């Protein structure tokens, strides 16, 4: 199944995040694809807030590769990966990304192509692109059951 969510501007981020939550179902691994500056981090930050993470905590893990958040509303763990600076698949394996993916916690992954060979089969693909008018389009592709 494929669904498109349009984000007209920053003011519509929260509504887009709520719409995305409606698609999450029991899936836990979400692979966010898009060019640099497409809005991956901005959307994930809005999504984390909608999932109950304190806005101050939801920052890009650019230098640490993985941030761990806990929802204030559900107490569930959420992992935010920014794999842009990942050197190799071996490095990903050394830091235990497969354990995170298998944990049952929500995993939000930027630059998932760096670990494509080890992404779970049921990972949800999210493609983010920028339209000419500055709006963003999220194409959410749910895996086939």
Image (cartoon, rainbow, N blue to C red):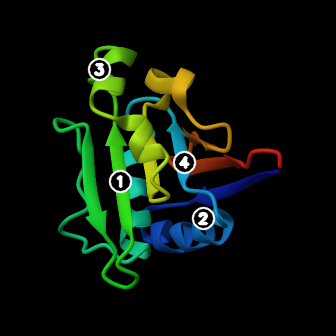
Query: Residue 70 vs residue 107: left or right?
Result: left
Q: Residues within 10 Å of mark 1 (few under 14, many from 20)?
A: many
Residue drawn where x is 23% and y is 55% of the image: 59
User: Quick check: can you spot residue 122?
Assistant: yes
Dot 4 or dot 3: first in sequence order is: 4
**Mark earlier in primary sequence (4, 1):** 4
Sooner in the amino-acid sequence: mark 4 or mark 2? 2
Instruction: Name the disc covering residue 122, or none.
Output: none
Q: Which residue is drawn at 25% across and 37% down?
A: 65
Q: What secondary structure is found at the residue carrying circle 3?
A: helix
Looking at the image, which is closer to me, 49 or 64?
64
Q: Closer to the camera: disc 2 or disc 1?
A: 1
- Secondary structure state at the residue bearing disc 2: helix
Q: Can residue 37 be seen in this view?
A: no
Q: Quadrant of residue 91?
A: top left
CB within 8 Å, label 4 to label 2: no
Which residue position holds label 4? 30
In the rendered structure, which disc, 2 or 1, sits on the residue that comes first in sequence? 2
Instruction: Relative to 73, say whether 14 is above or below.
Output: above
Q: Earlier in the sequence, mark 1 or mark 3?
A: 1
Which residue matches tag 3? 91
Is mark 3 in CB contact (under 8 Å) with mark 2? no
Q: Mark 1 points at which residue?
A: 79
Residue mark closest to the camera, 3 vs 2: 3
Q: Where is residue 49 in the image (x, y as percent from the top left)?
A: 36, 72
Camera-nearest label, 1 or 3: 3
Residue occupying the point 33% across, 35% down: 96
Residue 102 percent across, percent down from the top left:
49, 47
């Amino acid at each position: 199944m494929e669904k498109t969510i349009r984000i007209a501007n920053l003011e519509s981020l929260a509504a887009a995040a709520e719409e995305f939550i409606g698609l999450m179902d029991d899936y836990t691994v979400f692979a966010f694809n898009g060019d640099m500056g497409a809005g991956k981090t901005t959307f994930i930050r809005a999504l984390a807030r909608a999932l109950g993470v304190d806005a101050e905590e939801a920052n890009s893990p650019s230098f640490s590769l993985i941030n761990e958040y806990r929802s204030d509303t559900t107490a569930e763990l959420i992992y935010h990966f920014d794999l842009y600076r990942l050197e190799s698949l071996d490095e990903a394996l050394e830091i235990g990304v497969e354990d995170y993916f298998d944990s049952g916690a929500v995993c939000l992954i930027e630059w998932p192509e760096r670990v494509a060979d080890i992404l779970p089969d049921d990972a949800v693909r999210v493609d983010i692109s920028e339209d000419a008018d500055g709006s963003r389009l999220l194409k959410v592709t749910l895996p086939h059951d």
